[in-house]
């Protein structure tokens, strides 16, 4: 599934974020980040490595490593967003 998303992608960051939805559940994203820092679980290293490899095949450039660091930062932002969404959902359920 990831390879077909990467194949269709035209921009590395957007493609990577689309792939994270296919690779990780909402709960994994809400409870984790790419480094396992700040008390959160580390996202599956094998899945991240597979994503990096697929992206490198399509978007390889001398600056790939820098781009990959930017992608990981965006994945971490996505994780924070999932946490906020989860908290809002839980508060809404508690108020009903």
Image (spheres, rainbow, N blue to C red):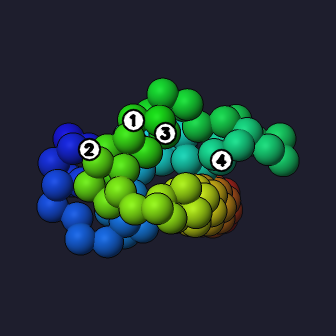
Q: Which residue is mark 4?
A: 33
Q: Which residue is mark 2?
A: 2
Q: Residues within 10 Å of mark 1 (few under 14, many from 20)?
A: some
Q: Which residue is mark 3?
A: 48
Circle nearer the N terminus (1, 2): 2
Circle nearer the N terminus (4, 1): 4
User: 90 or 68: nearer the eye?
Assistant: 68
Residues at marks 4 and 1, CA–CA distance in whole angstroms: 16 Å
Q: Quadrant of the C terminus?
A: bottom right
Q: Given contact means CB atoms under 8 Å apart, are the residues at marks 1 and 2 in contact?
A: yes
Q: Disc count in the image?
A: 4
Q: Secondary structure at mark 2?
A: helix
Q: Given contact means CB atoms under 8 Å apart, are the residues at marks 4 and 2 in contact?
A: no
* Residue at x 55% of width, y 47% of height: 29
Q: Which residue is mark 1?
A: 50
| Residue 25 visible somewhere in the drawing | no
Q: Secondary structure at mark 4?
A: strand
Q: Secondary structure at mark 1?
A: helix
| Position of residue 66 in the picture relative to residue 55 (left or right) | right
* Residue at x 46% of width, y 62% of height: 62
Circle nearer the N terminus (2, 3): 2
Q: Position of residue 70 (x, y in %)?
A: 58, 65
| Closer to viewer: mark 4 or mark 3 | 3
Circle nearer the N terminus (4, 2): 2
| Residue 1 visible somewhere in the drawing | yes
Question: What residue occupies the far front of the structure in this picture?
Answer: 62
């Amino acid at each position: 599934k990831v390879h077909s998303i990467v194949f269709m992608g035209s921009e590395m960051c957007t493609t990577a974020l689309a792939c994270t939805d296919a690779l990780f559940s909402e709960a994994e994203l809400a409870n984790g980040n790419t480094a396992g820092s700040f008390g959160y679980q580390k996202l599956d290293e094998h899945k991240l490595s597979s994503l990096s490899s697929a992206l490198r095949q399509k978007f390889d450039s001398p600056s790939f490593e820098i781009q990959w660091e930017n992608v990981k930062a965006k994945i971490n932002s996505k994780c924070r967003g999932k946490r906020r969404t989860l908290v809002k959902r839980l508060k809404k359920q508690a108020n009903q």
